């Protein structure tokens, strides 16, 4: 492997960038103002190797990482600008808080997913689906660069009351021992791979023992391959991290490396290709996922090209998501019918080895809802939907119908078809245990 030396220089202040001179005053102002509400962070890899500064502000990676004016409503933008110009820090702080609370900072009912063990509420875990537990290591609740569409933006915004994070590995272990039906532990964030290898090892290695035979899959959800591939090449503990991956394989478990790639350019550098190869050599499988985003990848050719390149490099296309209804979603919105058509067209232009991908999928409160199509039934135009995952596993893969709405961009905007008052899963408390939506029906 060619040695690549590249220091991870974090950019938290847009003024640090020499490239700022290529931006208009209005574009520079937008970064400052929108960045008061939505978190901003980038690094020199993203800035120097992924962004095409000759195409700014329309460059997709620039839009993925740098705040743009349109990401706030005109009123909110002007209010923040006014308080900044007045220098009224207290009023600015309150206004920013008020705006954030109206941007749906806790989408899809995540608070319903927080489990308990021995009377202790586990605020750094989520357990929505029977087989899979999410764990948020507190040391990994940041990212190498922040995505402007991120549905977990409150994690990075000082909104501690909405933050998922915990350090206590023993509580994770106690919970897993009480739930033998759990087969998968997903380490997520933020980005867990911003943490040191020694920290990740403290969480992962105990799960490789015989005591946890029921844990078959260790998953790591990360954007690190796209935004900082040197984590696997030249960081001080890069080799230690890869040895940790090898330990998972040697223990007879599967390491599912779930990597976020939003655009083909993120797969194009020598660094990312070398990093992919090193990870694959540990026995881990890399699966890929991304939301469908206006201004970034709302084009079937982009998706087809991305899936083809991923498979060429040995990756497994996994999910096309619909962007969650939070933060700057209105800027990235794609109507559901268009999302389905983009998926269908891209899917039809790749070979079978790319068709491991599923979508478009909405991670809504009841579960992962896939759009199967738009059709006409008994004279009514409808969306055909199904659960890929569900709070109640008995409801998975049952087709159901929603009234067609050409403007709908999220599941909560849909209404039942055929004059029904409720969707089938809302009847008879099919998502609830003992009538309480905070209970897990599969327990």
Image (cartoon, helix red, strand yellow):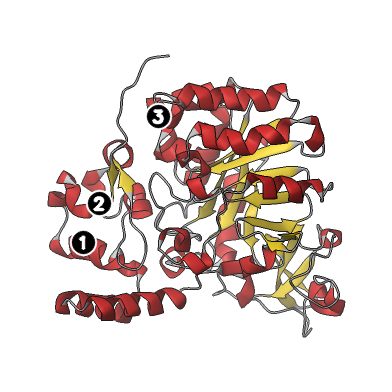
Q: Earlier in the sequence, mark 2 or mark 3?
A: 2
Q: Earlier in the sequence, mark 2 or mark 1?
A: 1
User: Which quadrant of the figure has residue 121?
Assistant: bottom right
User: Which quadrant of the figure has residue 10?
Assistant: top left
> Front-most of 176 and 150?
176
- Classify residue 137 as left or right of residue 393: left
Q: Mark 2–mark 1 contact, CB under 8 Å?
A: yes
- Classify residue 200 as left or right of residue 133: left
Q: Name the mark on residue 230.
A: 3
Residue drawn at (35%, 47%) of the image: 61
Give the CA distance from mark 2 to mark 1. Answer: 10 Å
Give the vertical position of 380 relative to 255 (above or below). below
Residue drawn at (18%, 48%) of the image: 16
Give the image location of residue 401, x and y in percent: 75, 71
Q: Name the mark on residue 27.
A: 1
Residue drawn at (31%, 60%) of the image: 67
Give the vertical position of 198 relative to 375 (above or below). above
- Which quarter shows the C terminus? bottom right
Give the image location of residue 383, x and y in percent: 69, 69
Q: Nearer the viewer, mark 2 or mark 3?
A: 3
Give the vertical position of 228 relative to 59 (above or below). above
Sort mark 3 into few (<14), some (14-19) or many (20+) by Cα contacts within 10 Å: many
Residue drawn at (63%, 28%) of the image: 284
Q: How many marks?
A: 3
- Classify residue 11 as left or right of residue 351: left
Tell me if I can see residue 145 in this picture: yes
């Amino acid at each position: 492997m060619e040695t690549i030396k590249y220091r991870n220089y974090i950019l938290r202040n847009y003024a640090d960038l020499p490239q700022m001179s290529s931006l208009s005053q209005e574009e520079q102002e937008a970064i400052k103002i929108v960045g008061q509400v939505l978190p901003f962070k980038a690094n020199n890899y993203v800035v120097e190797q992924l962004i095409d500064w000759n195409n700014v502000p329309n460059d997709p990676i620039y839009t993925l990482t740098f705040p743009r004016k349109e990401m706030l409503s005109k009123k909110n933008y002007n209010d923040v600008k006014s308080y900044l110009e007045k220098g009224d820090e207290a009023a600015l702080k309150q206004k920013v808080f008020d705006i954030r609370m109206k941007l749906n900072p806790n989408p899809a009912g995540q608070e319903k997913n927080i489990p308990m063990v021995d009377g202790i509420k586990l605020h750094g875990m989520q357990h929505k689906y029977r087989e899979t537990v999410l764990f948020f290591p507190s040391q990994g609740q940041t990212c190498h660069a922040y995505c402007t569409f991120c549905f977990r933006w409150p994690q990075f915004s000082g909104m501690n009351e909405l933050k998922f994070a915990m350090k206590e590995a023993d509580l994770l272990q106690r919970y897993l021992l009480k739930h033998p039906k759990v087969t998968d532990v997903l380490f997520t964030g933020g980005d867990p791979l911003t943490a040191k290898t020694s920290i990740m090892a403290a969480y992962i290695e105990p799960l490789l023992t015989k005591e946890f035979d029921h844990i078959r899959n260790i998953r790591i959800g990360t954007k690190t391959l796209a935004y900082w591939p040197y984590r696997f090449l030249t960081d001080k503990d890069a080799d230690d991290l890869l040895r940790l991956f090898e330990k998972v394989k040697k223990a007879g478990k599967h390491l599912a490396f779930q990597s976020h790639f939003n655009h083909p350019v993120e797969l194009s550098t020598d660094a990312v290709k070398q990093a992919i190869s090193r990870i694959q050599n540990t026995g881990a499988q890399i699966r890929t996922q991304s939301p469908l985003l206006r201004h970034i990848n709302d084009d079937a050719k982009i998706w087809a090209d991305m899936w083809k390149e991923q498979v060429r490099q040995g990756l497994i296309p996994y999910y096309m998501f619909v962007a969650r209804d939070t933060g700057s979603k209105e800027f990235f919105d794609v109507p559901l019918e268009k999302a389905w058509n983009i998926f269908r067209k891209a899917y039809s232009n790749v070979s079978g080895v790319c068709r491991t991908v599923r979508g478009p999928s909405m991670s809504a409160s009841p579960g992962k809802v896939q759009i199967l199509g738009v059709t006409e039934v008994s004279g009514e135009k409808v969306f055909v939907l199904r659960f890929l995952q569900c709070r109640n596993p008995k409801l998975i893969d049952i087709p159901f119908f929603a009234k067609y709405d050409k403007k709908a961009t999220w599941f909560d905007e849909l209404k039942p078809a055929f004059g029904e008052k409720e969707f089938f899963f809302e009847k008879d408390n099919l998502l609830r245990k003992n009538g309480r939506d905070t209970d897990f029906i599969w327990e």
